Structure formats: C-alpha cells, structure tokens
Amino acid sequence: MSFKHRVVVLKIVAGELSVSAAAAEYGVSRQYLHKLLARYRDEGLDGLDARSRAPKSSPHAVTDRVRERIVQLRQALAAAGADAGPVTIAWHLQQEGLRPPSTSTIRRVLHQAALITPAPRKRPRSSFVRFEAAQPNETWQSDFTHWRLADGTDVEILNWLDDHSRLLLSCTAHRPVTGKSVVDTFLTTIDIYGPPASTLTDNGRVYTARHGGGRNEFEYVLAALNIRQKNGAPNHPQTQGKIERFHQTLKRWLAARPRAHTISELQTQLDAFREHYNTARPHRARNGLTPATAYAATPKATPAGSRHDAVHYRIRYDHVGTNGKISFRRAARMHHLGIGAAHRGKRCILIADDTTVTVIHLDTGEILATNTIDPARTYWRNNEKEPGRWPDSPS
C-alpha cells in the first residue's frame, strides 16, 4: 500500500495529475490524498509508509500503579510462604479496590520483572480424573504430616479438610498422632461444624484396623454416628490428593517463618495459618473464592438418617469396675452406668450425646450397654437386655 501512495503523491507533485483526477484513477478519497500530501511535505517519502491503526493509548492498559502493586504482592506473598500466582494476585488487587488485569497480563508483568522461574511442563489438567464432593460436610479428608521443631524434635500435624470447599476444619500438632488424637479432634470439629456424611483417609492404623481383622476407636465413633467411612486403596495416595497437596501449602508457609521451639508455639503458628488459609487466600479450585466463603455458600450434607443438626458428642475411655459399673460425671454430678458383672475389667470406649451413653468393648466392638441420661437419677441402668455385637463387627 505504501508503494501505491508514493506513486499517486509523486504524480500529483509532478503535475501529471490533479488531486481530483488521482482520486478517481486510483480509488482514493480526496481527503486522504490531501493528508498524504501533508505528510509528504513534513516527512518526505518516509511519511507515506503504512501506519498502525492501533490507538495511541488503551483504557485497559496496565497502569504503573497496578504494575508496581503486582510486583509488590508477588514479593510479599512469596516471602510469607503463601501462594503468589496470578490468580491470587488478582484476588488481592480486587480486595484493595484496584481493577485487576487478566491473569495472562499479570503473568507477563511478572516475567518482565524476572519474578517467574521457568519450570518443566506439567501434566495437563485434562488428563486427571478428579472427584469433588457436591456439598460441604459431604466428605471430610484427614491425614497427618511430619514437621521438626527448632531443636530437631519430630512432631506430627493432624489435619481435617472439607472436600467440597477446601475449608481447613482443624489443624493440630501432636507428638505423635494417636487414635485418641484422631477421635478427639474429630469430635471437637463436629461440635463446631456438625457431623459429616462421610470421611476419607488412608489406611493408617489411627484411622482403621480393618486390615488387622478388627476396628479401632475412630471406626466405632463413625459407626455410632452413622458416618460412612471411606479409605483409599493401599499405596495409592492420589485418592487423598487434595490433602496431600494441602500439606505442601502448609509446609511452604511454615518454612517462611522461624522454627517453633515447642509444640505450643507451633500450634500458635498453625492457628494463624488456618485463619489465613480459610479467609485470606483465594482457592483456584473454588473459582477464586476463599474456603470459608465456599463453605458458607452451600447447604451442608449430613449423615444418612441423622436425628438433628446440632448434637454435642463426648468420648471417654474407661474400664468396667469390679461392681459391673462405670462412674460418669455430668454437669458436676457423679452418676453410675450399669454395665453388668459379666463385663468386669473390660476396656471400653464411652460415646455420650445429649440423651444416651453408648459403651463399647474396645477389643471386640461389642456394645456392652446403652444408658439413658437422666440428670435426676444417680444410677442409669443398662438398656441392653441382651448385649449384642456391633453390626458387621468381626466374630
């Protein structure tokens, strides 16, 4: 096109054609020819070259303020051990009242600032077979991971994660995690969020004893609350992929801070992380919502046949006394559970809700007694006339 412009302009300048004749012969408007002649007078033949039609400025261009804030957020989030990807940066910009550019633009700004380290190509997301609970409390995942205190002491961090919203329900430090730790944290979490319809864990002994031919305390509690237990296939941690990936996020955050000297100090750090993770960090799997927002946005699932939404559960370990009874304190008053002389000395787990105490033999899973709570009476008799085994318990 620039060659045609040069021919037309030179013919007009040489007097071979008038502006009107040139416009008719070459199919160019008279107004445009006058513009070309002005450019020729100012810039010579170079002024006739084709020019970009793009606007000199764009209303959507990244401002210097936003560009600087993108770099600042990247550096601050990375230093804090938090997620510092384009999606998270865009979320923080929006929280600050700034209009975030597209994630590809944020990535380009980070590249220009040399803040992105090239990484190997990852497996495409489309190749993964993913599952996700449709409602909060439909499935809780649990697992624990190792961490070291400042003096090298190994401790374990036990986590409970809602599969649907990714809400971190509980995050506690132990040395080590035991079956009692699992049960205690599980029941404490139920008191806050209500019981889940199911749980998903690996096959660690703190979660299941089925491969040893029995049941453990956690399994007894799940059965008593009518909560479905799901376990991943042995040697296949991908089944619990969400909480496995979560452990990376947790450890990256902890590594950005001074090592705790005690379990108490570590627990303080974990409490701060839980607050940050749930309320101040958008989750890419939840379309940029924080886990707390995603958890609150949808009705909660409940165990099949659950009686009501809010029940407080209390658990205790004890053994049947020589008189066939177990002492049980409630509301500052001591009561006595009738179990039966035939069960003297047996180790038990007691599960109490608002109306009933269920007593289960720890070794066999046999229900030794169900006792109705009656605050006016000191002695609560055994309602099991013929104590039977827990359904599906091993013989």
Image (tube, helix red, strand yellow):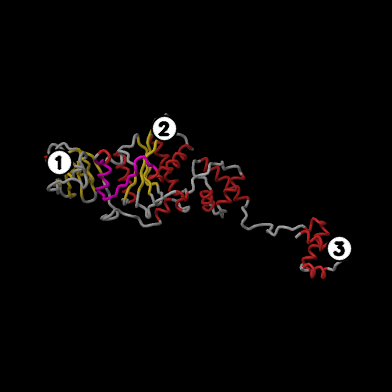
Residue on which disc 3 sits: 13
Q: Amino acid at mark 2?
A: Leu
Instruction: Please identify the quarter of the rendering in which residue 51 is found.
Output: bottom right
Mark carried by residue 149: 2
Q: Amino acid at mark 3?
A: Val
Q: Secondary structure at mark 2?
A: loop
Residue 375, image x and y in percent?
18, 49
Q: Residue at x 81, y 61 (%)?
A: 7
Q: Residue furthest top?
A: 151
Q: Pointer 1: residues within 10 angstroms few (<14), some, or many (20+)?
A: many
Q: Amino acid at mark 1?
A: Lys
Q: Secondary structure at mark 3?
A: helix
Query: Which is more foreground, mark 2 or mark 3?
Result: 3
Q: Secondary structure at mark 1?
A: strand
Residue 250, image x and y in percent?
44, 41
Instruction: Please identify the quarter of the rendering in which residue 98 is found.
Output: bottom right
In the image: residue 105, left or right of residue 302: right
Magenta stretch, residue numbers = 214-237
Residue 101, image x and y in percent?
57, 53
Residue 87, image x and y in percent?
52, 50
- C-alpha gap between disc 2 and disc 3: 86 Å
Query: Which is more foreground, mark 3 or mark 1?
Result: 3
Which quadrant of the rendered structure holds the N terminus? bottom right
Residue on which disc 1 sits: 325
The reply to whether callout 2 and callout 3 are in contact (CB within 8 Å) is no
Mark carried by residue 219: none
In the image: residue 25, left or right of residue 237: right
Q: Residue at x 12, y 42 (%)?
A: 340
- C-alpha gap between disc 2 and disc 1: 44 Å
